[in-house]
Image (cartoon, rainbow, N blue to C red):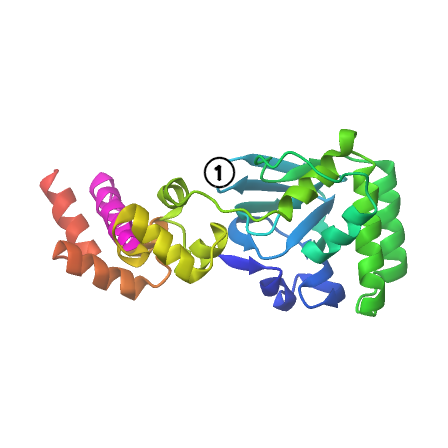
Amino acid sequence: MIIIPQRLFSDPNVRILMQDGTTCILEKSLPQTLSGREAYVSTHVISYVMAGEQRITTYAENKVTVRAGEAVLLPRGLYYVSDLRPTTGNFRSLLFYFDDALIHLFLQHSRILETDHSAGPDCLKFPPSPTSQRFIGAFLDLYGAGRHGKQFLLPKLLELLHLLNTQTDDNAFAAFLFRLTLPRQRNIRPFMEANYDKPLKMEDYAYLTGRSPSTFRRDFKAQFNVTPQQWVKDQRLAKARLLATEQEQTVTELAYAVGYENISYFIRAFRDRVGLSPKQFMRKIHRNSL
């Protein structure tokens, strides 16, 4: 799993056009399909697809396909899996990353003062628009060479937010942004039961549920009566044992399927729990089933 945009700054397929910390505008170009890339967003991002398509599955199993000319807003804290697919030539997209401070600045000039605080969709998609296409074309003509001064960054991001707001009815875009700035905590139990097998650290789980690490540990133990580290380990190893019983597979495949990226650690944890290594366990189970 990658944390974006931080990981993208060193990606050879990404060009930095403008940047001020994690507030930035990036251009991504991929010659081949990239499938099943797990990530979570540390800064709000608008992804505008210029060529190819992007398929997104969120932690809540919502599926979104973004084709050339379309855009999607992914809020900070969203865990998702993405497939990037070229059609003719390379996959290309522009990525606009911004923080709550920019949202507050935008909302000062919008008509929305209050909105429904109930949870909305976990991402927001925008259809193709001639206005958006002109904006993207003009931006690349002026700033496509990259590494422009950060004094241009906030004005261009604000311009994009205002442009997208004109494309939604009843201030839906502004209302979506307003909700992003509200303090929000996710219910720990359903989130953990759905995501314990993801390759996430405890700090990631805390962040994704809207808590500090210490608050997350306290709230988790109050609900589960065990530490989050122990509960996640128990759940992962129980699933690993079940998967190993159902079908024979490589140890690496089994480890990845239950959220372990360190294979050696997975083997030790499995042996401590079951008494056999994963390979020995699978051989025994499937030999007995013959």
User: Looking at the rendering, in which quadrant would you find the C terminus?
Assistant: top left
Given residues 22 and 268, the one toward you in this image is 22
Q: Position of residue 257 (x, y in %)?
A: 35, 49
Q: Is residue 191 magenta?
A: no
Residue 90 seen in the current view: no
Residue visible at 49% across and 56% down? 207
Splitting the image into 4 quarters, where does residue 194 fall? top left
Q: Position of residue 16 (x, y in %)?
A: 73, 65
Stretch in magenta: 231-250
Q: Is residue 162 left or right of residue 16?
A: right
Looking at the rendered structure, the secondary structure element under dot 1 is loop
Residue visible at 84% across and 67% down? 151
Q: Position of residue 9 (x, y in %)?
A: 64, 66
Residue visible at 25% across and 53% down? 226
Residue 82 seen in the current view: yes
The extreme top residue here reads 169
Q: Is residue 233 magenta?
A: yes
Q: Position of residue 38 (x, y in %)?
A: 50, 51
Given residues 59 and 181, the one toward you in this image is 181
The amino acid beneath tag 1 is Ala
The residue beneath circle 1 is 60
Q: Main secondary structure of the magenta part?
A: helix
Residue visible at 18% across and 49% down? 282
Q: Is residue 125 left or right of residue 57?
A: right
Compared to residue 279, the image places residue 190 above or below, namely above
The extreme left residue here reads 288
